[in-house]
Image (cartoon, rainbow, N blue to C red):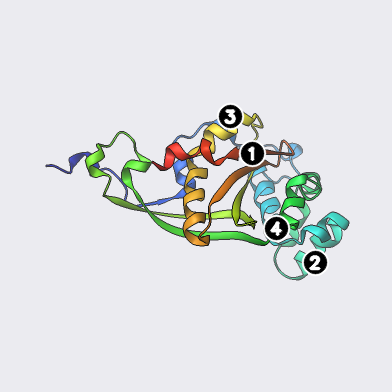
Amino acid sequence: YAYLPAAGALSKHTASTLKAERFSPEFFGDKMPSFLGKGGVTPTEIGTATQLFLQYCDFDAAKADICAERERLVASGRLSREQADCIDTQAIESFVNSPLADEIRNADAVYREKRFTIAESICALDPSLPHEFSGEKTVIIGKIDLCFVKDGAAVIVDYKTDTVTDENALVNRYREQLSLYVRAAEKILGCRAQRCVLYSLKGRKSIDVPRYALDEFGE
């Protein structure tokens, strides 16, 4: 059977499962005793609530008064009371006061939670497959946390709540995922992606990943 090597390739992927397939427990907070969390919530729940806040908040309003902006999102139904009470306010304050947030404020266009569906060669996702199968496609569904455009070039921002904050470890873990985001953003927006930025909420820092560091995954 000539197509046997490609038979195991999935016809559909989500961008997040690409990293999950190479799971390493050191990157994730697990369930924890209530005395270690905010009111007994898990690190995952805190991370989810924090990302929801960043999805819907007004960055300027959050910089001026994060508590008032949190209450506005509760009143508008964007956050539940429980979610609002467990967000990592220190992580958010660090982000909205960062140079990256200033870049976003000064952008020509900003897109949040940009969903995409793209078709990619199965060989791009699995380099072990013979090149003769490069014409076979798989569908990838994903969502970009934030993307902004300045002077005709796009910058992709991906919030991370990993417990690991080492820059090289994070870049190595998410490089393939970021490469997909680059290709998706370029197809959707029609402009070149200049770079990606991993923002570590735990580490309170931005990690720039230049385009050339991702190109090998798009070949």
Tell which tag, 1 or 4, sits nearer the viewer: 4
> In the rendered view, does 139 fall on the left or right side of 60?
left
Tell which tag, 3 or 2, sits nearer the viewer: 3
Amino acid at the residue labelled 4: Ala
The residue to which callout 3 is attached is 169
The residue to which callout 4 is attached is 107
Amino acid at the residue labelled 2: Arg
Residue 24: where, in percent of width, then height?
Answer: 52, 31
Q: Are marks 3 and 4 in contact (CB under 8 Å)?
A: no
Residue 127: where, in percent of width, then height?
Answer: 34, 35
- Rendered-image quadrant of the C terminus: top left
Choose the circle earlier in sequence order: 1 or 4. 4
Amino acid at the residue labelled 1: Asp
Tell which tag, 2 or 4, sits nearer the viewer: 4
The residue to which callout 1 is attached is 208
Q: CA distance from mark 2 to mark 1?
A: 32 Å
Q: CA distance from mark 3 to mark 1?
A: 13 Å
Q: CA distance from mark 2 to mark 4?
A: 24 Å
Choose the circle earlier in sequence order: 3 or 2. 2
The residue to which callout 2 is attached is 72
Nearer to me, 22 or 40: 22
User: Label 3's element?
Assistant: helix
